[in-house]
Amino acid sequence: MKRPRSTKRLRLGLLVGTTSALLAAGTAGILCAQSRYGNYAPAALGQLDQAVPQALREDSTFSVSAFPLYPSELAAGEGQQETNIFCGQCHSTRYITTQPPLSSAAWEAVVSKMRKTYGAGIPESAAQKIVQYLKIHYSPK
Amino acid sequence: MSRRSALRLLGAAGASFGFSATLRSATTPPQESTMPPALPGSTGPGPNPYWNSVGMYVNEPQKAPLLLLTDRPVQLETPRHYFATAFTPNDAFYVRWHLDGIPNAIDLKNWRLRIDGNVTKALSFSLPDLMRKFPAQTVAAVNQCSGNSRSRFQPRVPGGQWGNGAMGNAKWTGVRLSTLLSAAGMKSGSLQVQFQGLDTGMGPEGYGSKAFLKSLAVTNPVLEDCLIAYAMNGEPLPLLNGFPVRLVVPGYFATYWMKCLTWIRVLDKQDENFWVKTAYRIPDTPRGATTPKEVKAGTVKTVPIHRMPVRSFLISPDGGSKIPAGMDVILRGIAFSGYGRVNELEVSDNDGKTWLPAQLGEDFGAYSFRTWEFRWTAKKPGRYFISVRATDKTGNIQPDEPVWNPGGYLWNRIERQEITVGVAE
């Protein structure tokens, strides 16, 4: 099956900061004169996305379908929801689940880097909860 | 018929033809307990024991199924078997983006490559301008992620947990960067040339999470080798590899090879942006090596990452199956270096005690993968450790010591592969 083309899911505007933006990030695209970008859509595993030439038009726009998104694999537990929302703003939480087990200090450093260096807007109370969650589920046993 | 009686029947049929074999029933599903454990989504705290990273196969636009690191932004690793040849197919070429706003569509009527900043004349070029107005140049060059093989590090470091497949080799065709820079005319006081592509992130303005930019010093001789490539292996670049044009910096790590390159700015001051000043830096030490202790003490002086140290790989056999004793097998692989062509490749079948030279394949230039072959016969059954090591023109030889730095960069230790040779009679 062909994944839906990005045009239909296109949204305008900058999507930084608000909660709805965080949740919409998965399917929203951004448009400027020369390009359209940031369009992702949930996808099923194990299907080959076969080329469908008749869907293409002979204009000057060169496009690809939405980039596939796969379900978050964050471990269940206290703090999962905060981690999902706040750590899924700029990248998928797969950035967390693909890491090797990291020490408590390393997780603290990661969360602090996201906030200070990358400017992640995460309230202190949520940040503490996230660090606690990461230490419990993603540190060496 | 029960499974057992079916097996007995099959066994009897086999025996009556004068051979014997162990047969497994094709109709009975394997028991849960006999199934191999699924690969984990991550590895550690020890090193990743596999050649590749452990992600699942996924299907991204214009790509063959590749191994998933992350889905947003897209990061995909190339499976081992694709490295059996000198050139990596475009649809199998690994993918690495930093920010999640990756182009899905580019309107070439409006798209322009722009050069501005400290120049006499700001210029912009359409894709046909680049293809027709300037002589086309082609270079075979390896593109390798700075963090390739990061999952080998001990202790492990955060970042993309690549196996060995965050690399690829292609014939890149395009315009010389220096031609365009001279057309624009760099004014005196120019210090760096900054590159930016179409990707953008969700972070706030002024942060590395918003824009990805890289720079090279105007005095860096590598600028003379740089191409602005509109073709990869003679075809348009896949969007995920930087369509319509990407910067090619032969010999340098891929962090400089800006994808969807759109802005070139000549700067009259040092680039202070995060991706130059803070990220992609290596200790200013031999091999870029340091220790967690030195990092903690804050005594490590760093420089921007630059050329790729010499590396080589055994691609096949991959150790996944037994080889019968006495049978000739061809060991095959690739080698490359950012410091000049690989002119020697050696193989050891005794874990590095003695080395024999391998046959090098066709030479596609100093920056290309070079294939190699070695005919090997294991006379006796047993477990063998095959190691391969390359030497480049500068005289650099792959070391057997691991390297460690907090970024997970510059891994180039000698690779080893365990191979089991079985009894043939």
Image (tube, coloured by chain):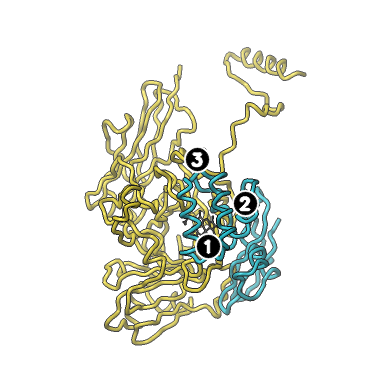
Drawn side of residue B298 relative to residue A5, left or right: left
Residue A86 placement: quadrant: bottom right
Q: Nearer the viewer, mark 1 or mark 2?
A: 2
Mark 3 packing: few (<14 Cα in 10 Å), some, or many (20+)? few
> What is the distance, in whole Å, between disc 1 and disc 2 at their CAs?
39 Å
SS type, badge 1: loop
Name the colour assigned to chain B in the rendering. yellow
Residue B238, numbered circle: 1
Q: Is residue A26 above or below residue B318?
A: below
Task: Please report the residue visible at 62 percent of the width from the left and 71 percent of the height from the top.
Answer: A15
Q: CA distance from mark 2 to mark 3?
A: 18 Å
Crowd class of label 1 (few under 14; some 14 to 19; many from 20; radius 10 Å): some
* Callout 2 amino acid: Gly
Q: Which chain is cyan?
A: A
B309 or B189, nearer to the observer: B189
